[in-house]
Image (cartoon, coloured by chain):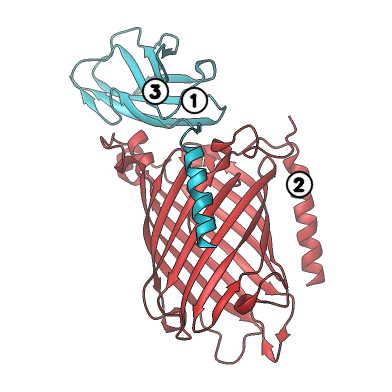
Chain colours: A cyan, B red
Amino acid sequence: MTRTFAIAAIALLATAANAFAHAQLEKAIPAVGATVTTPPTELRLKFSEGVEVRFTGVTLTDAAGTAEELGPATTDPSDKSLLIVKIKAALKPGAYTVTWHAVSVDTHKTQGQFMFTVAP
Amino acid sequence: MTLTFHRTVGALTCAVTAALTSSAFAHAVCGDRIFPATLAIDDPGVGDELALPTLTYWPLNSNGSREFDAEFSYTKTLLPGLGLSFASGATWQSPGGYGWEPLNTELKYNFLCVPQSEFMASAGFSVSWENTGTGTQATPFNTYSPVIDVGKGFGDLPTSWNFLRPLAVTAEVSAGVPGQTWTNGQQNATTLNYGFTLQYSLPYFNSHVAEIDNDFFRRLVPLTEFAFSTPIANAAPGTRVTTGTIQPGIMYMADTWQISIEALIPINVASGTRVGVKGELHFFFDDIFPDSLGKPLFAFK
């Protein structure tokens, strides 16, 4: 019985290794919670899975809640899990909030939010 | 019992009707929060998933026997937010011997998700079926259990409390009502089963608070589960004692599966006399087989 369970579990693990999943944020530039001295000119969000750029969006707001103007979201041509968004105007020193929502290539929806700070 | 049963069936009928028009809740995701599958307290979500195997080793039960369990649980979504699960497994006791546990089925509906509050709730009704167990686990009567599961993430705390935002609490309350009050001269007690989990999600920390520069650590969820059971009716004299375990442990969350291990610390002598261990490998079929086994049997748009 235990052997049957083990064989089934190993077979599923092998299948799962090639599967898609919910797109979770793994890394970002600027990094989650980071303080940067040079104002970023773009946001780079690295997800655990490829994302559908048509259904994926990012907003950037300052400490007062005012939205910064952003360019269209695109993915890296060689990596659909890397979302890139240009920031149109130079950011002033202060705290900023990035809010994102994503749809992975297998249509699962995820969302999140993080902050970074531009030091004076 | 009959009135309770009819009310439950009525509630579940309403739930099925509501599910026909509800939006989908894949996995156990609510807002920014993903509630992982935990070992003692069921998560508040409904998804296509398989726990295989769930292994439990009790070094010393309250009756002096050692016990090892190898179990599984499979959940299939019928409609978005509505799932039917099947669970069973083998038990070895020494002394005592081998037995196959009764088949347990549960119909569960995820009726609430408040994304901004990361709050999720589900209601279910489970049946442990008579005469489906064998050997030491043979049981000649059904046991009926209405169940409520809730989960709350603390991502809505102000950013000044940033380090508490990865915290989440889930809780479960159920009643185990035997379909037979006496068996072979022994009373079958009705029990109230309840508990909660405290979880600190490092995946949430990594994506919301501060980046963790290590692929392994940012997928861990340290947690502690608290699971209790109290006989509330038809208990034999001297057996109305609350039993339970405190289960500190850790979980690794991959993209499509997770693995957990927890210590089982009995809360009193009636719950056991040594520390045990429980582990589980868990697969999310909505991620592994999104176009076949991992989606609801019926979906209305």
Q: Quadrant of the C terminus of chain B?
A: top right
Residue A68 visible (yes or no):
no
Q: Chain of mark 1?
A: A
Q: Position of residue B203 (x, y in %)?
A: 37, 40
Task: Give the residue pinned by disc 3.
Answer: A65
Vertical arrangement, residue B20 with respect to residue B271, above or below: above
**Mark 1 is on which residue type?**
Ala
Label 3 crowding class (10 Å Cα cut-off): few <14, some 14-19, many 20+? few
Q: Chain of mark 2?
A: B
* Tag nearer the camera, 2 or 3: 2
Element marked by disc 2: helix
- Who's the residue at 72% across and 78% down the image? B140
**Mark 2 is on which residue type?**
Val
Label 1 crowding class (10 Å Cα cut-off): few <14, some 14-19, many 20+? many
Element marked by disc 3: loop
Task: Give the residue pinned by disc 2.
Answer: B16
Task: Give the residue pinned by disc 1.
Answer: A102
> Could you tell whether B183 is left or right of B46 in the image?
right
